[in-house]
Every structure is written in C-alpha cells, then in structure tokens.
Amino acid sequence: MARTGPVTKDTSTVALGLAKILIGDSAGNITTKTQCLDQSADSLGALNSSSFTSNVEYWSLMSGFPQQEDMSLPLSETAQLDCEFKEVHPRNLAFARGIDASSGYTDNHSGEIPLGAMSSPAFVRAEAIYTYPNGDNHMYIIFPRANVTSSVELSFNESDNANVPITISAKRADSDVSGGDSTWDEMSLGRIYFD
C-alpha cells in the first residue's frame, strides 16, 4: 500500500529539544554576522523552555464590491526569544532585570541586583543555537542588538526548581540607529542561518 499524507522528507531536519541561549556584549560584537559569543561563559545555562517568535502585522488592500483582497503590505515586524532559565544566580537575574551583565557578575553566589532603580534595558547581543538531533547540523538565531524585557517572578517550591521566564526582544541594529552598524542594513533585526 502506498503511503499518503505528509511524509518525512529528511529526518535530519526534525527539531527536537531546546536551543542554547547566549547573551553577551552588543557593542563589541555588532559587526559580526555569525555566532561569536562564548558557548560556555555567555550561556544562560540549563533551560526549562526556549522559543522563537517573529510577528508581522499586515495591512490589506481591499477593493470591489463585494470587497476582495488585492494585496498585503507589512506594517511592523518584531522578533523575540522567550525562555525560562533554571540556574538562578546574579548574572542571569541581572539580565532578566534588563542589566547588561556581560561583564562583571562572574561569581555565581555573590553580587547585587538593585531594586527600585529601573532604567531603559541595556542593549545586549543574543544568540540561540539549536543543535539538530543528528549532532552535526545547527540553526542559529542572531539578535546583534536586543533588550531583555521581563517581569521577574521567582517561585520557590518544595521539590521543583525555580524557572525564571525572560523575553529577549530584537532591536534595530542597522547603521541608521545609534549603536548600529552597516553590517545589519539589509537585516536590521538580525538573522537566522543554518550550517
């Protein structure tokens, strides 16, 4: 009997598992289009979840009676990474509070996170590295200039670890914005690439 319906074409492209999330210095790495952060030192560590979302809002041109849609034009675009980290230490909490912790915060058990002193979130570089189950192929999501915009909630339970949710929002990195670079003029929010 012939198989019907959608059939797997390439098992090496099936996505399973979590991406590794790295956060580091934006200004010092703004000209780099490929993955460049340190996969150990810049990692958020163990994650409970990770996801990528790219939202586009469209305007539709309608004409005739009854009206029918002639075309769609993009009005706005956003890209973000949402994740929950399991490792609660000063560096991760600083990032969650919008502080650039890419330098400093090197000790996992000492440091300070000021409360009641919020300001605009720092610009950071974010990289998500997804390794396909074959162990050889990767998908990279690069936000060269991003903000971490989160409301931190730590929930301590008797037998479950705390999972701290954060949102990493891509911001413009092209040469028309302060802190941007011409490297990103054709892809101002960043890029996804595969190898």
Image (tube, grey):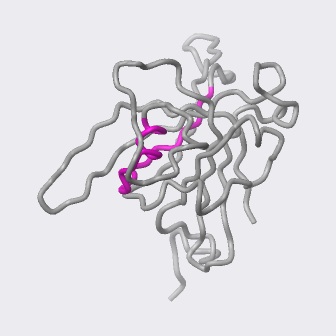
When asked about the image quadrant of residue 21, the answer is bottom right
Point out the image quarter for the C terminus.
bottom right
Q: Is residue 47 left or right of residue 56?
A: left
Furthest-left residue in this view: 158
Inspect the magenta stretch and tell me whether residue 90 lies in it: yes
Residue 20 pos. (x, y %): 54, 60
Of residues 147 and 67, the one nearer the viewer is: 147
Pick whichever, 195 or 27, lies toward us. 27
Counting every numbered tag in the picture gives 0
Write the start and end of the magenta stretch as one range.
77-96
- Left or right, 177 with respect to 25, comes to right
Percent coordinates x, y for residue 24 in the rendering? 63, 45
Vertical arrangement, residue 33 with respect to residue 65, above or below? below
The residue at the point 54 percent across, 14 percent down is 66
Q: Nearer the viewer, residue 187 or 8?
A: 187
Say whether residue 21 is magenta. no
Where residue 60 appears, as percent x and y from the top left, is 61, 19
Q: Is 72 left or right of 133, judged from the image as shown?
A: right
Quadrant in the picture for residue 185: top right
Left or right? Give the position of 149 relative to 26: left
Considering only vertical position in the picture, is 195 above or below 70? below
Q: Residue at x 73, y 55 (%)?
A: 35
Give coordinates of residue 44: x percent, y percent.
Answer: 49, 54
Which residue is painted at 49% across and 31% down in the image? 98
